[in-house]
Image (spheres, grey):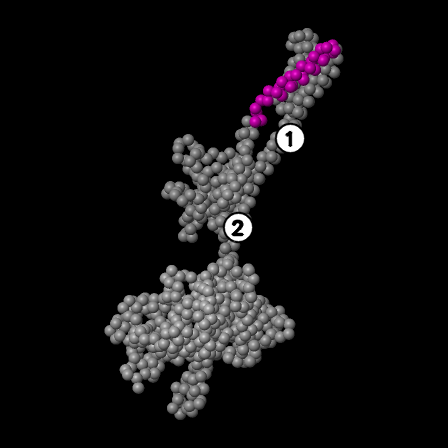
Amino acid sequence: MTQTQQKILIVEDEPEIRRFLRVSLAEHGYLPLEAAEGELGIAMAASEKPDLIILDLGLPDIDGTEVAQRIREWSAVPIIVLSCRGQETDKVAALDMGADDYLTKPFGVQELLARMRVALRNCAARSDSCYETIFTAGKLRVDISKHLVFVDDVEVHLTPIEYKLLQELIKNAGGLVTQQSLLRNVWGPGYAKEGHYLRVYMGALRRKLEEDPAQPQYLITEPGVGYRLKVN
Amino acid sequence: MGQLSAISFQLVAESKLLFEDLSLRNWVRRELKINWLEYIAAFLLVATVTAVGFLVQWQDATANLIMLYLLCVVYCATTMSRGAAIFASIIGVASFDYFFVPPYFAFAPSDSRYFFSLGALLIVALLISELPARTRARAVLAQEQARLAEVQYFLSRDLLSTTAIDELVCLASRRAGEVFHCQSAIWLPNGEGDKIALASGQQALEADMVAAAQECFNLKQAVRRSHSGTGSCSELFLPLLASQQAVGVLGLLSSEAINLDPPQMNLLLAFANHTAVALERAILWQATEAANLRVEQERLRSALLSSVSHDLRTPLSSITGAASSLLASFDSMNREIAKELIQSIYDEAERLNRFLSNLLDMTRLQAGIINLKTDWYSLEEVVGAAISRVEKRLNKHRIVTKLPGDLPLIEIDPTLIEQLFINLLDNAAKYSDPGNEIRITAYATSSLFSVEVFNSGSQLPLGDEVRVFEKFYRGRQTLSGCGVGLGLAICKAIVQAHGGQIFAENMSSTGVNFLITLPIKREAPRVDLELEPEAGG
């Protein structure tokens, strides 16, 4: 059915969690590889060329954040970080270093698989640089080639910035987009600290696209981290 | 800034004024200074009496004359200095003798009776002049004491106003410097045995100076040091002796000689005493505070322990039980039963996770580990995130949000405020029946942001509106089981960390309302908005 098994590198020091991941990933058709330490993880990322890395932030030898940073220096492989409650700062740091998404322990395997699928798909789309021309999620439909947005088949008029914001989220649909990257890509590098712009425009976008902006169906907030465009 | 310097100027001026004429030596010098005017006045008085007696030819009525001279002496003694009175009595007797006692216009009285008059006059002069002189001396002394008390008050008046040791030490050393016109420093024990360390005063001190201060502290005695051989010292160290031990050293350092009069010295000693008492008080206060904190931490820890052993063991027991029966008889087990056991393991693990998260949050908030990472956020977003986080747990409840579209951005820590709403929603879901409405309303004035979370569940027991926010408070048992009793305590801690307030109130008809108010400390930054696109453009 699938062409080849996709390799998933697990960098995690807890053997029980490795075991749970190994079993679950193998069960779902992936090929799990394991590293119990950060340095080994970096080495295996280079030698094995995995399709995705699951990276724990609390490693015995080096900081998970550092592992993410060092891998990002030469590879665009998707990285999903596993964080604990109380590691919020490290988590945001790792995401700013280039990690693609995160999960907070304890997490269910369905959550993990969903994040992995999104990260793998978005990565493939990036490398092929072929984006779909029509994006749909629920009642939301975006014609990317024509810059048209519809809710329930009724056209919605967005300002240029609102559209750019939506476009950034669509590029990584389903995945996490950090505040930093949104501010950088939509407003420019000088706006990295101007989070209030993001809040105001995101609010405006929600009022145009969401039925109830306080209980959004598409534009989901991850407080303190970023935003996620929910696909289904 | 200008105001501050004005105050310090006033302080210095005040201290200078208080110190003027303070020394005893000045007073003695003033007392001994001969006031020539008084002597001239006494002389003129006696001369007038003599002239009158001479003109009316009172050589025969010597008793009258003596009375007049006596009057002169009494007047001088009461109104002028003692010297003037004695002077008046001497020249009075001399004139009497010279002009009115035969032989006239010559001394050496022939009649020995007049010797007695002379002596009596002198004694009266001395006795009477003694009285006002003594009264005056007493008044001067009283004034002196009042002035000393005033200086002492100025020195010590703020010492009891603070229990912060740093502040106290700064204040004491500054006051000492102002009043005694020199630099001052205070050393306090540095916590390592008997060593002391500079707590306030100039930073660059010579090593021998430090040694001298240390010596003063060890011996509990004043230490004087002088650089020149003049005998007057330029450094003076006083131990700060409290009721139980020496609590520090006060040093006066001057490039000139420090020469203190006995009253000044007394004042300095009294000041050192006051400082020591204030320091000891502050030290004791801090110890009490630390003890209270320890007691509170101990209380929390024991409550935590009992909570952990009781509440956390329940889900653990279910997990262990379910997993062990799965392990033991998985092959023979009915699929449905196996699935039920697995579901139970999952649910109980989730519950355990929530308990632990609450405990972790509470201890972190309690210990002040959490630093607020505030930025401008939209309440709508944070509430939305909280709702999506609890959605699974309360799918039977309807959440209604009434957030005006023009709510301003608010400066908050988004993760903490999200947690606040998660806990409030969990609480609302726990204490109201499935299918009921949970309503979130918000409004803002120019200075206050208010959010209400209403649930139509049963009311709080009377008087529990405040107690619900206490740690380990639990409401009535519910179907979903009781929490660990920390959810609302965490809410309170989060709101307080933002400088806001949280209240619970029973609504008149039914339900409970939680009201959160957060202060708006400054205006949200401006965001330049784009023009809305033309429809169809």
| Pointers 1 and 2 within a single chain | yes
Q: Earlier in the sequence, mark 1 or mark 2?
A: 1
Badge number at residue B162: 2
Q: Does residue A146 lie above or below B231 as drawn?
A: below
Q: Secondary structure at mark 2?
A: loop
Label 2 neighbourhood size at 10 Å, few (<14), some (14-19), many (20+)? some
From mark 1 to mark 2, how far is it between C-alphas? 42 Å
Q: Quadrant of residue B339?
A: bottom left
Q: Which range is magenta? A: B30-59
Label 1 neighbourhood size at 10 Å, few (<14), some (14-19), many (20+)? few
| Residue A210 x/y as whole percent | 48, 74
Mark 1 or 2: the one toward you: 2
Amino acid type at image mark 1? Thr
Q: Where is mark 1, residue-wise?
A: B135
The residue closer to the viewer here, B79 or B385, is B385
| Residue B229 x/y as whole percent | 40, 32
Badge number at residue B427: none
